[in-house]
Amino acid sequence: MSALPDNAPMLLRRDETGVAYLTLNRPSQFNSLSRAMLESLIAEIDAIAKDTSVRVVVLAGEGKAFCAGHDLKEMRGNHTLQFQQDLFRLCGKFMMKLTELPQPVIARVHGIATAAGCQLVSMCDLAVASDVARFAVSGINVGLFCATPSVGLSRNMGRKEAFEMLVTGDFIDATEAQRRGLVNRVVALENLDAEIARLAASICAKSPLAVQMGKQMFYRQLEMGMDAAYQMAAETMACNMMSEDAAEGIDAFITKRKPEWRGR
């Protein structure tokens, strides 16, 4: 793999038919999440949140790895409690922004996803992996329990399955990751982009308002008791039903035509 020029951007963006592709571009560092990378990701996600032309975000990695987690060299080179606290808070801020983003986010996992890289997969709304991708939360192998990755991991899979990964640092393959709920789909590497394009196109064909309202409600209700969740869900559906998009969608269904979404 040829070396990148010194001025190469660490985060690439490409927009295509309603889909924003964000690519981590530190291949020689296995796309590790340095402080600068996290700041770049936050800035781009903030911009996308305001961009109504974007319907779906695809998060990918350049080179051999999807993301190998935090930049350990940077962390060791700034060995103060303040730096570590600021770094992990910044990472948590970014991960929450993925959940708060109006548009669904799909992780394109072509290679390894370890530690905070595995956390990143868990915090994306959807994930499609190649059949050669592998996953681990391997901080425990260097004396560091992956506490922040455990938040996303434990919300994707069963407690015992998540805890086993956290205390062993062992890798699981893509098929096992799918079985545990960490990824939605597993396909051959050569079919990865086509599969993601199909998934993104399916979402883009839906009402943007309904998708946005639904994503917001979905994450909020997860943290509620069942009664409160049903109350909030009922209110969301009632408001959604009063929208122009719902009226258009139902009328189109009744008259057997394609709906024309207005986003209102």
Image (cartoon, rainbow, N blue to C red):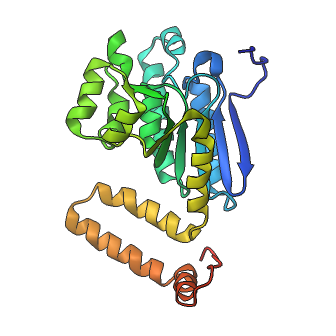
Q: Pick whichever, 13 or 252, lies toward us.
A: 252
179 or 106: which is nearer to us? 179
Regarding residue 88, the answer to whether it shows in the image is: no
* In this view, 143 is above or below 215: above
The image shows residue 197 at horizontal and vertical percentages of 62, 50
Foreground residue, 204 or 24?
204
Residue 158 rendering spot, x and y as whole percentages: 24, 40
Give the residue at x 31% y 56%: 222
Q: Where is residue 50, by image quadrant?
A: bottom right
Q: Is residue 151 above or below residue 205?
A: above
Left or right: residue 214 compared with residue 4? left
- Place of residue 205 in the rendered image (x, y in percent of width and height, measured from the top left): 60, 66
Identify the image quadrant of the C terminus. bottom right
- In the picture, the quarter occupied by the N terminus is top right
**Where does the image place residue 3, in percent across and percent down from the top left?**
74, 14
Taking the image as shown, residue 143 lies to the left or right of residue 88, namely: left
Q: Is residue 160 visible?
A: yes
